Amino acid sequence: MTETKKPWDKAVVYVIDDDESLRRAIGRLLESAGLVYDLFDSAETFMSSCLRQADVSCAVIDIRMGKGLSGIELQKVMQESKMHIPIIFITGHGDVQTSVKALKSGALHFITKPFENEELMAAIDEALMFDYTNKKAIALLEKAKAGYENLTKRERQVFTRVARGFINKKIADDLQISEKTVKIHRAHMIDKMRANSTAELVRIASALAEAKILTTADIE
């Protein structure tokens, strides 16, 4: 079976577990899957290390470790440090309360030992795809904000109407300007937004609206 090509070039999986045998076993599993990985024996070692650069990443973390911070405590430190790395928790002491707390705090998965290799790999694949999608959305929003901030008020009005599917004549009637003027504003707007199609403008507008950057004053 041909493996589906991933949309990223380099992925790294960070494994934080004080159990050396399990840590190395997960490393061998990741290596067999062609994934780059780094192994850490504690939360402190992970946080003090210079992590290698990657397009996408995720962390496999033991919930309970014999020394230093627990997995839950490490998750909190990562959030406070703005380390946006998807987390998969593993534990040999699984219970419903800990699982709910981990997931409510943003973890993607909670896997109880012993687990099947396929279960862990499926969770890792999902976490890497989640990280890719999240980073892509952040990049789109940054691009959208940069372009939107450079638009004039009239260009913003044209932008929001184009994103809503209005044709030039409708925009001209709506704003009480000529179609020729609409075309000029539209060309400037597209250039500033660095958009290649109306579909991309729609995606950009959706990102701006979700971030509450678009205002009623811009639309009217």
Image (spheres, rainbow, N blue to C red):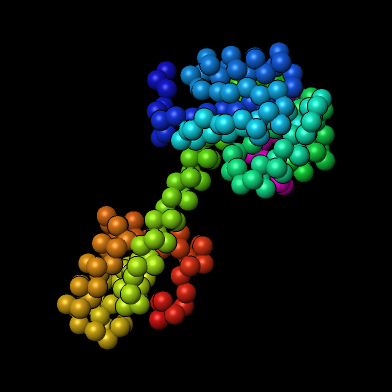
Name the residue nearer the viewer: 48 or 118. 48
Residue found 76% across the figure and 31% down from its top: 63
- Relative placement, left or right, of 182 versus 52 is left
- Relative placement, left or right, of 69 versus 56 is right
Name the residue nearer the viewer: 63 or 68. 68
Which stretch is magenta? Answer: 103-113
Residue found 70% across the figure and 23% down from its top: 41
Quarter assignment of residue 96 = top right
| Quarter of the figure that contains the C terminus | bottom left
The percent coordinates of residue 210 (x first, y second) are 51, 62
**Residue that lies at the very extreme toward the bottom in this rendered image:** 176
Residue found 27% across the figure and 55% down from its top: 196
- Relative placement, left or right, of 18 versus 199 is right
| Quarter of the figure that contains the N terminus | top left
Name the residue nearer the viewer: 92 or 116. 92
The percent coordinates of residue 193 (x first, y second) are 32, 61
Q: Relative to 43, does residue 135 appear above or below in the rendering? A: below
Residue 27 lies in the magenta stretch: no
The percent coordinates of residue 20 (x first, y second) are 71, 15
Residue 111 lies in the magenta stretch: yes
The percent coordinates of residue 71 (x first, y second) are 74, 34
Quarter assignment of residue 188 = bottom left
Q: Relative to 196, does residue 209 appear above or below in the rendering? A: below
**Residue that lies at the very extreme toward the left in this rendered image:** 180
Name the residue nearer the viewer: 46 or 215. 46
Residue found 64% across the figure and 26% down from its top: 15
Could one spot residue 60 in this view of the protein?
no
Could one spot residue 181 in this view of the protein?
yes
Quarter assignment of residue 200 = bottom left
Count the marks: 0
